[in-house]
Amino acid sequence: MNRWQNLWRYIPLVGLMLLLSGCGSDTLSALRPRGPVARDQLFLMELSLGIMVLVTVIVFAIYIYVLVRFRKKKGDKDIIPKQVEGSHVLEIIWTVVPIILLLILAVPTVSYTVKLAENHIGNKDAVHVKVTAHQFWWQFEYPELGISTAQDLVIPKGKKIAFEITSADVLHAFWVPSLAGKQDTNPGMTNTMYFEADDAAVFMGKCAELCGASHALMDFKVISKTEADFTKWVDKMKAPATISADARNGEQVFKDNCLACHAVSPEGLGMGPNLNGFASREMIAGVLPRIDKDGKDVSDAKLHEWISNPQSVKPGNKMPAFGPTGSKPLQDQQINDVIKYLNALK
Ligand code: CUA
């Protein structure tokens, strides 16, 4: 293979690097922190990366210098140069320098680790949230506020959110890259963590542990609001939904078929997500956007798709199919009635 053929082999690699460097977004990137916890963690990453780059550059510079400077040139005789093993000066240098570098790395790492592991549950100024991961959705309980919800984690900006994190089935991991590093959710075990958002915005959350067929679809959102808007949201979640007369049929169908798994009360918990306030959630089933690319509201069609055949949307999830060929078939009219009722749950 000649020199050029050799170089061509690296083209796909360079292409891949360019392609991947475009990944990430403002609301889903550990490299663009939007809160103090994520900022501290990014600082630790930059510090260790900086030290690693420094060491690599210096070591390679010496290596290349020695290669060039001391290589055998044409006409050189076969001689062995002066040997310097056992040099006290050199040995002290390469023992002391790494110790200093490790200290620079260790002091902030240990102190930040202790700080970020602080438990803020019970702290009067923090909002306490219990997170439970399910295949393939997220449950959020606010025990002090008496509400529970799913998929959209609503928080006040500028306040510490103190989490207790667990799983109802298999291993998952709770991750909001813009706000903090991930934390495992393990069945039968509770982990704690906290984060805080700088401003009112929507951040993307991900499940960061392979947990089954729809792991990649196990997304959620963190909706950070001003303190006043957060209080409004809490009040709304507690207020009973107004069910208009034309949604009453759907309410009955829902009670007969869905209520066994899906609570619709402020505090209710069940096998499936609590649907209280469902019509205000940004996504259906966490993955189907209500608004399509052209800005059209496609909630009804997407809900119909989801209720009829949930497996086609999120493979491996535990919801039965209510479509004509499903395990719990409903008539088309009944599904449409349920959709009407769900749209009333604002
Ligand atoms: Cu849950 Cu991956």
Image (tube, rainbow, N blue to C red):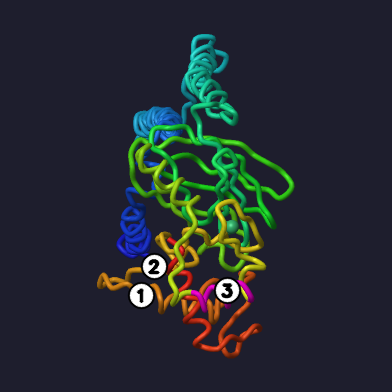
Q: Position of residue 241 (x, y in %)?
A: 47, 60
Estimate how packed mark 2 is, as few (under 14), some (14 to 19) or many (20 or more) residues with alpha carbons within 10 Å. some
Magenta segment main secondary structure? helix
The Cα atoms of the two marked residues, 1 and 3, are separated by: 21 Å
Give the residue at mark 2.
289
Q: Earlier in the sequence, mark 3 or mark 2?
A: 3
Query: Which amino acid, by three-letter code, is at mark 3?
Result: Phe
Task: Tell me the tag on residue 254.
Answer: 3
The CB of the residue at mark 2 lies under 8 Å from ligand 1 = no
- Residue sitting at 50 percent across and 64 percent down? 217
Q: Determine whether the residue tagged by mark 2 lies in a helix, strand or loop.
A: strand
Q: Amino acid at mark 1?
A: Val
Work out which residue is located at the far front of the displayed protein and give it.
245
Kindly identify which residue carries mark 1. 298
Which residue is at the front of the view, 102 or 236?
Answer: 236
Quarter in which the N terminus is drawn = bottom left
Q: Residue at x 54, y 9 (%)?
A: 88
Using a 10 Å C-alpha cutoff, classify the residue at mark 3 as few (fewer than 14 neighbours), some (14 to 19) or many (20 or more).
Answer: many
